[in-house]
């Protein structure tokens, strides 16, 4: 297999962009007295985790697929605590991510090592 499959690239870029934008957006809350510091730090850690997940997907780390799914499952739960609409939106994103990361072409990409050369 030459190069990365498009579904993996799409998910990886979405995680990297989402993580970066979320980090920048929530970083300003560190200096806001209305926010609990431990909650803000937890949110920032989750955003860094999203970026890391995206990068690891690009580096063909198989468990990064499961990290991406776990990250989205966590957001489904958080969305459910906020509203039904948020929960449904996160479930839709979760399904899309699972489908893209576990398509046959994506699974083959994560199975092959050494740049796609079969052993």
Image (cartoon, rainbow, N blue to C red):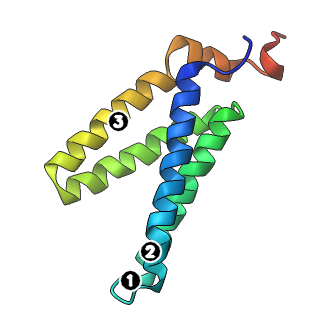
Left or right, 48 with reference to 82? right
Where residue 90 appears, as percent x and y from the top left, is 30, 42
Measured along the vertical axis of the image, is residue 37 above or below residue 118?
below
Residue 9, quarter of picture = top right
Q: Residue placed at 38% from the left, 83% from the top?
A: 36
Quarter of the image that includes the N terminus: top right
Separation of marks 2 and 3 at Cα, in angstroms: 24 Å
Q: Which mark is residue 1?
A: none
Q: Are marks 3 and 1 in contact (CB under 8 Å)?
A: no
Sooner in the amino-acid sequence: mark 2 or mark 3: 2
Q: Which residue is labeled 1 in the image?
A: 36
Left or right, 7 with reference to 81? right
Q: Nearer the viewer, residue 101 or 3?
A: 3
Label 1, secondary structure: give it: loop
Q: Are marks 2 and 1 in contact (CB under 8 Å)?
A: yes
Left or right, 112 with reference to 28? right
Separation of marks 3 and 1 at Cα, in angstroms: 28 Å
Q: Which residue is labeled 2 in the image?
A: 40
């Amino acid at each position: 297999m030459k190069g990365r499959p498009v579904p993996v690239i799409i998910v990886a870029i979405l995680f990297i962009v989402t993580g970066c934008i979320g980090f920048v957006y929530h970083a300003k809350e560190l200096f806001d007295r209305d926010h609990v510091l431990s909650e803000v730090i937890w949110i920032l850690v989750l955003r860094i985790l999203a970026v890391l997940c995206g990068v690891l997907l690009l580096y063909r780390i198989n468990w990064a697929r499961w990290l991406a799914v776990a990250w989205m499952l966590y957001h489904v739960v958080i969305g459910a605590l906020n509203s039904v609409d948020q929960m449904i939106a996160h479930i839709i994103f979760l399904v899309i991510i699972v489908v893209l990361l576990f398509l046959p072409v994506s699974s083959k990409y994560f199975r092959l090592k050494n740049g796609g050369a079969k052993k």
